[in-house]
Image (cartoon, rainbow, N blue to C red):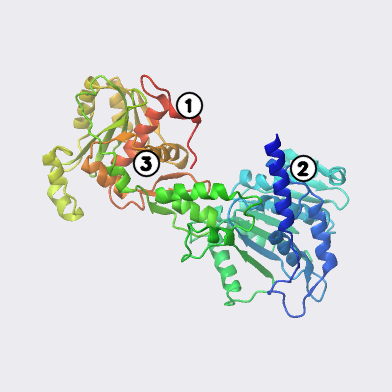
Amino acid sequence: MRFLFSCSILGKEAAKLRKLKRYKPTKFMAEGSRYDKEAADAAVTFINCLKHTKGEWYGMPFELIDWQEQIVRDIFGILKPNGYRQFNTAYIEIPKKQGKSELAAAIALYLTCDDFEHGGEVYGCASDRQQASIVFDVAVDMVEQCPALKSRIKPMLSQKRLVYKPLGSFYQVLSAEAYTKHGLNVHGVVFDELHAQPNRDLYDVMLHGSGDARKQPLFFLITTAGTDRNSICWEVHQKAEDILQGRKIDPTFYPVIYSAADTDDWTSEKVWRKVNPSLGITVDIEKLRVACENAKQNPAEENLFRQLRLNQWVKQSVRWMPMDKWDKCAFPVDAEKLRGRTCYGGLDLSSTTDITAFVLVFPPLDESDKYQILPFFWIPEENIDQRVRRDHVPYDVWEKQGFLYTTEGNVVHYGFIETFIEELGMKYNIKEIAFDRWGAIQMTQNLEALGFTVVPFGQGFKDMSPPTKELMKLTLEERIAHGGNPVLRWMMDNIYVKTDPAGNIKPDKEKSTERIDGAVALIMALDRALRHGGENIGSVYDERGLLIL
């Protein structure tokens, strides 16, 4: 209790140290516009009367941090000669955990309750209803903690709507079906995580023409950097950059970007402080240090660190496995000593002309044992020489060494593989075989007829991310043994991973131009092994849940 109390006090003191000491209007204030302190004070005072809704800050007054107050004063205090706000679009791009959800919720409430817009329509938008609800739920908590607002706002939670009775205005969450949104009379839009928008439809509907009937609509866009440079967010990001650099002029557009340059040292704490304006308040530097150390060990984590912590637009896919770490796991695997052991299989058929992979994973018997891997690969016999010349890959050498099998003809003979797996089932206790449901229906039916338990395995982020992250963790900890199989090594080196907005990863078959079938089969088999555990130890998922890196 003493620790928590001291943390709260320290946090509060830190916030006081980061108050805006002297406001200077943005350099983008247009000629003829003026700063109206009264208008700015009204917005700042309203927000400061709200309370925080998360963690150690819960229940404390929402005292704006310096960078937040600068934005609020610029947006609401800079007025055109006609007395209306100069900026109707604000684009705020900033790393995660800076307090952007609470700032967005506070602005949504101000637009709804204190902007003197009768019948004002304020909408919360995101890539999906769940994401848009994050800001809305924060707003609901703020209302619950403010008696003055609570007595004047009618919550309609089933509809994700807050109605401010004195003005007949409301704040409403919208889902992403843009085609239903035409005809809205928008006073305000809070667009959360614009980078996650799957297309530009919702953005175009909400920002183009929907606020024409209002005197001073505000479109508040707040996001972390993304990965897709063919997205609406990248388009808006580029516009913001052009304005910041003086290449374009748009007096209605207010740009703020906290981001590290591509040439910056991403491991430098000086850089972290530059791009994380809430560092030491809402962001703990120790957590950044831990995340940075993880990123140094893992190229996939490096990209996530750069995107989420430094707000850099990174490539969606990155070569994933550090091969020096993989090679350290080339512990010998004795197939004969594994006879009778429990194991789990992963089957990736690809197409009939490509490599087919089947991988067995043997869970450890005790804490001193490792996850042992037995991989098997097949290609058509007739075109092996052609493949060697085309791919510049030594398939013929691997076949002679016994690391690769061939089947008769110019396509992979699935019947041969079924017989091969049946024979493996006589040697080893194969509990389950996971397979890609899109490519192996007939074979899996045949394997079921042979007495095997086959389990369909999705190839999306939900199913692939946990075991993919676990594979990396086990590799870094040298808790797997793969015997240095050269075919599997080649495939591991070919893997690129794709990352979604939530930080989930999966092998990216489109970016991985070389074969990765064995790696995918390994990931599927490892998932089953991790879920069910070995003979003497339990599931790692049961012990601590899914790994979130």
For the residue labelled by badge 2, is the local secondary structure a helix, a strand or a loop? Answer: loop
Give the amino acid at mark 1.
Answer: Asp
Residue 125 is left or right of residue 24, and the answer is: left
Exactly how many numbered labels are in the figure?
Answer: 3
| Label 3 Cα crowd, 10 Å radius (few <14 / some 14-19 / many 20+) | some
Q: Position of residue 512 (x, y in %)?
A: 33, 51
* Residue under pointer 1: 542
Q: Position of residue 355 (x, y in %)?
A: 24, 42
Find the distance from the CA under tag 3 to the CA under tag 2.
42 Å
Which image quadrant for residue 235? Answer: bottom right
Give the amino acid at mark 2.
Answer: Gly
156 versus 299 height, above or below: above
Q: Tell me if I can see residue 67 in this picture.
A: yes
Find the distance from the CA under tag 3 to the CA under tag 1.
21 Å
| Label 2 Cα crowd, 10 Å radius (few <14 / some 14-19 / many 20+) | some
Judge by depth and name the residue closer to the eye, 227 or 379.
Answer: 227
Give the amino acid at mark 3.
Answer: Leu
Residue 240 is left or right of residue 302, and the answer is: right
Judge by depth and name the residue closer to the eye, 360 or 181.
Answer: 360
Judge by depth and name the residue closer to the eye, 206 or 138.
Answer: 138
For the residue labelled by badge 1, is the local secondary structure a helix, a strand or a loop? Answer: helix
* Residue under pointer 3: 476
Q: Sequence order check: which comes first, mark 2 or mark 1? A: 2
Mark 2–mark 1 contact, CB under 8 Å?
no
* Residue under pointer 2: 59
Name the residue at 47% across, 39% down: 462
Q: Sequence order check: which comes first, mark 3 or mark 2? A: 2
Q: Sequence order check: which comes first, mark 3 or mark 1? A: 3
Q: Position of residue 444 (x, y in %)?
A: 31, 29
Q: Tell me if I can see residue 184 in this picture.
A: no
Q: Which of labels 2 and 1 is toward the front?
A: 2
For the residue labelled by badge 3, is the local secondary structure a helix, a strand or a loop? Answer: helix
